[in-house]
Image: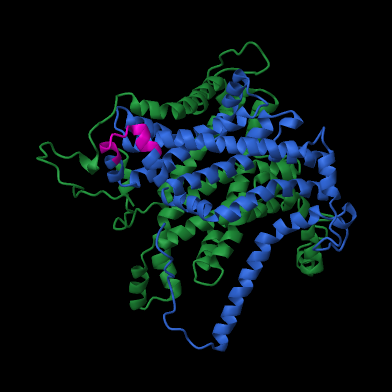
C-alpha cells in the first residue's frame, strides 16, 4: 500500500549507548516480550492443555507444557462420532467456508466490474443502495432471513451458510475500488482486439486484480469459518454443525473437561492460524485498507 | 490512488466530441450487459438483504408468532410496548440495553486508546516488527467461539491459570487490600464478569484496531514531523499536534466501528458467562435473538432490532459530529476515489 513506514521521530544519528539509552532499549524489548506472552500465550495454552490428561490439566500448580504428550482428549473427540462428530464439523466448516468464498469471489467481482467499468442507467443508484447497507447492523437481517431460509428449505443445510452471506456489500465495494484503479488502457487494447466484456473481465481485469481477490478470498473464508450466531440458530442436527456451533455444544456437554474442549478449540484454530501465517500480508492489508476507505 | 490521466493515451484522429470525464469510454456494449454482470449479486442481495429489510419492518408491525397461523396487524404496538413499563418485553429489552451499554462504555475507550499506543510502538523500526504485528493481530483470526471457550478455561475460578498466576505472583495481596479474596470469581460475580468480558474482547480485537491505526500513521506525511522538529517541538508536542490531528479521520472510523462491534456483543457473553451472573451480562442482542428465535415472538423481536439500530444510528451520528474535522478545514483527505463513484 503506502511506501515503507517513515518513523516519525527517527534518530538520524546513532548515539553511543549510554546507560539511559540502554535502559530504554531494554525496557522496549521487555515490553515486546510481555506483549508476545500476553497475545501468544493463551493460544499456546490452548494447544498445550489439549495434550494433557484431565488430571494434569486441573492440577495445581499447572504445568506449562504437558509432562507427557497425551492424545486422549483427541481420542475422545474422535470417538464421539454420533453426538459430537468433530470430523464432520471440520468438513462442514471447510465446505461452507470454501463455498462461501467462491460464491463471493464470483458474484462480487462481476458486480464490481459492472459498477467500475460499464455505464448504464441506475448505476449510481444501485451502487448507493449496495453501499448504504454497509451501515445497517447485521442483526436486523437475522430473523427475516431465518424465515426466508425456512421457506427455501435451507434450514439445517450448508446452503444457509454459503449463500446469504454473499449478499454482503463489502466485497463489491472493496473490489470496485480496486478495479477503478486499474488503468483502462489495457482493457481498451483488449477491446480493440475484439474482446467482448466478458473476455475483458476474465482475461484482463481479474488477472490484474489478483491481490485484491486474494485479500477478499481470505477475509471471506475467515469470516465464514468463524461465524458464530448464524450457524448456532440455523443448524440443529449435530452432524450438520460447523466448528463454532459444535464448540458450544461440546462446552455444554464437557463443562470442565478442559482438555477435550481445548482439543476441539484447537482443531477449530489450526486451519485459520495456518491460513493466517501464509496470508498475513493479505489479511492485514485488507484490514488496513478497509480503515482508510472509511 | 486513482490515476485520472487526462492526457490522451494515444492520439485520436480528429476528436470532435469532448472526451467524457475521467477517460470513460463511450458505451460499447449491449444495454443488458451491465445488468447481466450484476444479476448474480443482485439476486442474492435482493433475497437476503433488500427483501429481509422490508420483511423485518412488516413483521414488526404484526403480532408475528412463528408458530401461530394468524399474524394479526398491530400497528406500532410492538414498538410502543418497548416504551411502556407495564409490558414484559419492556424490562427484557431495556435490561439488555443496559448490559450492552455497559459493555460499550467499558470496552470502547480501551479499544480506542490501547491500540493507539500499540500502533505507535509497532510503528517504530526494529527487527521483528512484522512478526510482532502478526502476533498482536493473531487472536483476531480466531473466532469468538474459540476465544470464548478458551477464556472460559483461563478464567475458571478454581483451576484457571489466571487466578493461579495472581495468587502465585503475590498480586492477590493487592486485591486483598480492596477486600477481595482468592479465588477471584471472574465469571460468577460482578464486576468481575464485566472485567473478564471486556478483557478478553480487548485481547481478541485489539490487533484489528492497531492495524488500522498503523495504516493511518503511515499516511501522515513525514515532512510534518520534520517541520515540527525544526520548530523545536518535543516528542510529546509532536504527538499532540501532528500525530493526533493526522489520525483524526482514521479515529472517526475506528470509534464508529468499535462502538458498533461492541454493541453487537453476543458470543462472549453466550459462551463465557451465559448472560450471568443473574442476567447482568445478557446483552440486548441475546435478548432479541432469544425473543425471536427462541420464543418465536418475531414481531416484538423485529421491533427491538429496529429500535436498537435507530439508537446505534444516532450514536454513530453523534460520534461523527463530535470527532469530525470541524475546526481545521485545511486538511481535507484526498477524496478522489469517492468522487469517482458518481460518474
Residue A214 is inside the magenta segment: no
Residue A228 picture quarter? top right
Colour blue, chain: A
**Would residue B155 be seen by someone viewing this image from the given angle?**
no
Looking at the image, the residue that sits furthest to the front is: A193
* B122 vs A187, nearest the viewer: A187
x, y percent for residue B166: 77, 64
Residue B283 picture quarter? top right
Residue stretch rendered in magenta on the structure:
A190-202
**Is A163 above or below relative to A244?**
above
Q: Residue at x 51, y 61 (%)?
A: B116
Residue A198 is inside the magenta segment: yes
Q: Residue at x 80, y 63 (%)?
A: A64
Colour green, chain: B
Q: Report the colour scheme.
A: by chain
x, y percent for residue B180: 79, 60
Q: Main secondary structure of the magenta part?
A: helix
* B132 vs B107, nearest the viewer: B132
**Would residue A126 be seen by someone viewing this image from the given angle?**
yes
Residue A9 picture quarter? bottom left
x, y percent for residue B172: 79, 65
Amino acid at each position: 500500500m503506502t511506501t515503507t513506514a517513515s518513523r516519525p521521530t527517527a534518530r538520524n544519528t546513532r548515539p553511543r549507548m549510554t546507560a539511559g539509552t540502554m535502559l530504554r532499549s531494554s525496557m522496549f524489548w521487555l515490553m515486546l516480550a510481555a506483549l508476545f506472552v500476553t497475545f501468544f500465550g493463551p493460544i499456546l495454552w490452548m494447544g498445550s492443555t489439549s495434550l494433557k490428561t484431565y488430571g494434569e490439566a486441573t492440577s495445581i500448580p499447572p504445568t506449562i507444557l504437558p509432562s507427557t504428550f497425551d492424545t486422549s482428549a483427541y481420542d475422545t473427540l474422535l470417538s464421539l462420532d454420533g453426538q459430537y462428530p468433530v470430523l464432520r464439523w471440520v468438513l462442514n466448516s471447510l465446505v461452507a467456508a470454501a463455498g462461501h468464498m467462491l460464491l463471493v469471489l464470483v458474484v462480487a467481482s462481476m458486480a464490481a466490474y459492472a459498477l467500475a467499468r460499464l455505464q448504464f442507467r441506475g448505476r449510481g443508484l444501485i451502487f448507493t443502495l449496495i453501499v448504504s447497507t454497509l451501515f445497517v447492523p447485521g442483526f436486523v437481517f437475522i430473523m427475516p432471513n431465518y424465515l426466508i431460509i425456512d421457506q427455501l428449505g435451507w434450514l439445517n443445510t450448508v446452503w444457509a451458510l454459503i449463500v446469504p452471506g454473499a449478499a454482503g456489500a463489502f466485497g463489491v465495494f472493496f473490489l470496485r475500488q480496486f478495479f477503478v484503479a486499474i488503468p483502462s488502457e489495457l482493457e481498451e487494447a483488449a477491446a480493440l482486439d475484439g474482446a467482448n466484456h466478458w473476455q475483458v473481465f476474465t482475461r484482463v481485469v481479474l488477472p490484474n486484480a489478483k491481490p485484491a481477490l486474494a485479500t477478499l478470498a481470505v477475509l471471506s473464508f475467515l469470516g465464514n469459518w468463524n461465524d458464530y450466531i448464524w450457524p448456532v440458530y440455523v443448524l440443529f442436527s449435530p452432524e450438520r454443525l460447523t466448528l463454532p456451533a459444535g464448540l458450544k455444544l461440546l462446552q455444554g456437554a464437557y463443562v470442565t473437561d478442559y482438555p477435550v474442549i481445548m482439543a476441539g478449540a484447537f482443531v477449530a484454530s489450526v486451519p485459520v492460524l495456518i491460513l493466517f501465517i501464509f496470508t498475513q500480508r493479505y489479511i492485514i492489508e485488507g484490514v488496513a485498507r478497509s480503515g482508510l476507505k472509511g | 490512488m486513482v490515476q485520472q490521466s487526462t492526457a490522451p493515451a494515444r492520439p485520436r484522429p480528429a476528436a470532435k466530441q469532448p472526451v467524457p470525464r475521467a477517460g470513460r469510454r463511450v458505451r460499447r456494449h449491449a444495454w443488458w450487459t451491465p445488468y447481466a454482470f450484476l444479476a448474480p449479486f443482485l439476486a442474492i442481495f435482493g433475497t437476503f438483504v433488500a427483501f429481509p429489510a422490508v420483511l423485518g419492518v412488516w413483521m414488526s408491525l404484526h403480532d408475528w408468532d412463528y408458530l401461530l397461523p394468524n399474524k394479526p396487524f398491530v400497528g406500532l404496538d410492538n414498538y410502543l410496548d418497548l416504551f411502556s413499563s407495564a409490558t414484559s418485553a419492556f424490562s427484557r429489552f431495556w435490561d439488555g440495553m443496559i448490559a450492552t451499554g455497559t459493555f460499550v462504555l467499558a470496552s470502547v475507550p480501551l479499544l480506542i486508546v490501547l491500540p493507539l499506543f500499540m500502533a505507535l510502538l509497532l510503528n517504530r523500526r526494529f527487527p521483528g516488527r512484522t512478526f510482532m504485528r502478526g502476533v498482536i493481530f493473531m487472536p483476531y483470526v480466531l473466532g469468538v467461539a474459540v476465544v470464548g471457550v478458551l477464556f472460559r478455561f483461563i478464567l475458571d475460578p478454581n483451576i484457571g491459570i489466571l487466578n493461579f498466576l495472581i495468587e502465585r505472583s503475590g498480586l492477590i495481596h493487592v486485591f486483598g487490600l480492596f477486600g477481595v479474596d482468592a479465588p477471584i470469581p471472574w465469571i460468577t460475580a460482578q464486576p468481575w464478569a464485566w472485567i473478564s468480558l471486556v478483557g478478553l474482547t480487548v485481547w481478541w480485537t485489539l490487533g484489528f484496531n492497531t492495524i488500522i491505526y498503523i495504516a493511518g500513521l503511515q499516511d501522515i506525511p513525514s515532512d510534518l514531523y520534520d517541520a515540527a522538529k525544526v520548530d523545536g517541538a518535543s516528542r510529546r508536542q509532536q504527538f499532540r499536534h501532528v500525530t493526533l490531528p493526522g489520525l483524526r479521520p482514521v479515529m472517526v472510523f475506528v470509534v464508529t466501528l468499535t462502538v458498533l462491534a461492541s454493541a453487537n456483543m453476543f458470543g462472549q457473553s453466550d459462551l463465557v458467562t451465559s448472560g450471568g451472573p443473574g442476567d447482568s451480562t445478557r446483552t440486548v442482542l441475546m435478548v432479541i435473538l432469544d425473543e425471536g428465535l427462541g420464543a418465536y415472538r418475531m414481531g416484538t423481536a423485529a421491533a427491538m432490532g429496529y429500535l436498537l439500530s435507530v439508537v446505534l444510528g444516532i450514536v454513530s451520528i453523534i460520534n461523527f459530529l463530535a470527532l469530525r474535522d470541524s475546526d481545521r478545514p485545511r486538511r481535507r483527505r484526498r477524496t478522489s476515489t469517492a468522487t469517482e463513484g458518481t460518474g
